[in-house]
Amino acid sequence: MCGIFGYVGPRQAEPILIEGLRRLEYRGYDSAGIATLSDSKLFIRKKAGRVQELARHLADDPILGSLGISHTRWATHGGATDTNAHPHLGPSSHGDIAVVHNGVIENYSALKRDLQNEGIKFLSETDTEVIAHLLARQNDPDLLAALRRIIPMLKGTYGMAAVSPRHGERIIAARLGSPLVIGVGEGEHFLASDPSALIGHTSKIVYLKDHQVCVITADDFHIYDASHSRVSFSVQNIDWKSTDTDKGEFPHYMLKEIHEQSESVANAMRGRLDHENATAVFGGLNLDPRQLRKAERIILTACGTSYHAGIVGEYLFEEFARIPVEVEYASEFRYRNPPIDQDTIVIAITQSGETADTLAALRESKRKGHRSLAICNVVGSSIAREADGGVYLHAGPEVGVASTKAFTSQVVVLAMLALFLGRMRNLSSLQGAKMIEDLQALPEIIKKTLRCNDAVRQLAEKYQQTSNMLFMGRQYMYPVALEGALKLKEISYIHAEGYPAAEMKHGPIALVDKQTPSIFLTPRGSVFDKVMSNLEEVKARGGPVIAIASEGDARAADHVASRADEVIFVPDVPEYLQPIVTVIPLQLFAYHAALLRGCDVDKPRNLAKSVTVE
Ligand code: F6R
């Protein structure tokens, strides 16, 4: 949520900062701003709206300088206005100070009141402006010293950067709970809240840790810990290809990422399937076989789409590893105090690795002494670094705000974990070998599944005007129903609900009428007949029905086709892998419906890619 990009070096900062903000825009896009230093003068431009608005404004009114900081905002305090956009200014006799900030200063209103009582005037409604005024009030030409003095006053989270003409050609930055990385170039340095924004500039990055501050110049940078001592650091290489963050031949990131799923699922499995022992192998779990065998319970904790993958994981672990599993919303888990015995493993599932609630849930679980793992996409993210061990998705950057390829990769990783844990317990080598065969077939099967695109687009054309929609499924299809509804509502703004299909008659069936279509997930499987009965109940009440069914079984196909108004067929796969093939038409349906309704698919209103506030 919100993005920070900074540059110091020999080149003009403005185009570099704007390009950096474009890369970060998926993190927040209600306003953007930029501050540069030139000839000991501070220049600021900021604008409500997309980065494009700011770029237009800069074309009319350019700014010079080879050092600058910039920000793209997702509003937390105060609406999306020019004034509330960052950078915020702290006027000082030693030269104004410009500040950009991600995170939330929880005690900002008390701090603001104190500052106002001293006669300081605030221009914006943001929490960030208190940081700028606090820094300015230190009246210290040494910005680093000023920052160190104000940090203990701040309660909450921050990734922040500041520049001031009196402080010379340097950027200072600090992190607590909101990510920042330094990009190391030749005679130039960068600062970013997300390493992917540095692609094309440098592949060398240094992650800032919580409680660290840094001073960055064109030639050098230094990092200090909370006790003001200089600390050593390691420079890491990013291995993402720059094409990963281009849209390529696709009009939107979301469509590109839906089509990447064959490859991303293959990448999640690469090197992890052990044919000889009919199991899966993971390099980074950091748990010895004894600890794994002793595990009596697994808690999966996550938010949003990752939470839905967690429910699939629950079914997978229970079926194949015979371990009791609970799935918890991270935002609830972090504040609950459930009795958990020592042989419980907690696994946080997250694409970004920065979701504030998931990070807090992981920390809470570690505090209580549980082995705490992460299934995560972004290498080096906060959750990846703080977990005791884990599994990377290797899905490549997911830029579209609606999560798609991360979900299928999460499900594949969970299936491999279920295989791995199952083989330590009750699964035979034959069963293990069969699972490996099933998993390996997935990339080709996903390619075939994507052929439903045109049929799904026609469906979207037919139903795009609807105001409400229901998604129903049972067993492995229940979390897919939740995910289909989430995808549709978040990008097309059509109200949608997902339910376990049989639960419908306990209330939601009251919503069924001619104007409320239902999507039923009816692939071949153990509950096929049961779901068909639920489908009939909706039909009997006049509700239009779309079914997602398996190819290959003529009898079942006829049965579905004669009951549903429309059917989308997907390849037949074993039941436990059906979430992967059935979610694809739902992702595509949401995409096409949103497009037809004129919505901004990659940047839906009110959302941001990674939710780094509570
Ligand atoms: C929905 C979506 C969100 C995220 C959620 C968790 O399409 O993207 O619901 O799944 O914010 O994010 P991560 O997985 O980054 O922790």
Image (cartoon, helix red, strand yellow):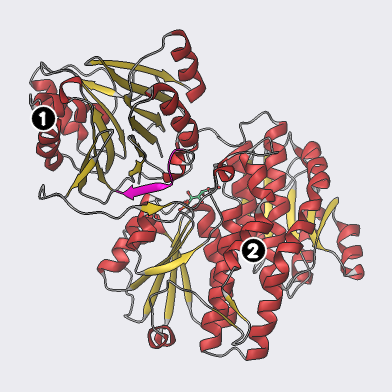
Between 117 and 51, the one lying in front of the other is: 51
Please state which amino acid type lies under the numbered disc 1: Asp
Image height of 329 relative to 176, above or below: below
Looking at the image, tell me whether mark 1 or mark 2 is earlier in sequence order.
1
Q: Which residue is drawn at 33% across and 25% down?
A: 86
Q: Mark 2 points at which residue?
A: 266
Crowd tier of the residue under label 2, counting other residues whose Cα lies within 10 Å: few below 14, some 14–19, many 20 or above: many
Q: Residue at x 46, y 44 (%)?
A: 196
Range of residues picked out in magenta: 201-207
The residue at label 2 has a CB less than 8 Å from ligand 1: no
Tell me if 80 is positioned left or right of 475 in this view: left
Q: Which residue is drawn at 91% across and 58% down?
A: 562
Image height of 381 relative to 473, above or below: above
Residue 232 visible in the current orientation: yes
SS under mark 1: loop
Please state which amino acid type lies under the numbered disc 2: Ala
Q: Is residue 264 rendered magenta in the image? A: no
SS under mark 2: helix
Between 215 and 135, the one lying in front of the other is: 215
Q: Where is residue 98 in the image (x, y as percent from the top left)?
A: 25, 24
| Quarter of the figure that contains the N terminus | top left
Tell me if 488 is positioned left or right of 519 in this view: left
Q: Mark 1 points at which residue?
A: 142
Q: Distance between the residues labelled 1 and 2?
A: 52 Å
Q: Which residue is drawn at 44% across and 14% down?
A: 58
The residue at label 1 has a CB less than 8 Å from ligand 1: no
Q: Position of residue 429 (x, y in %)?
A: 63, 90
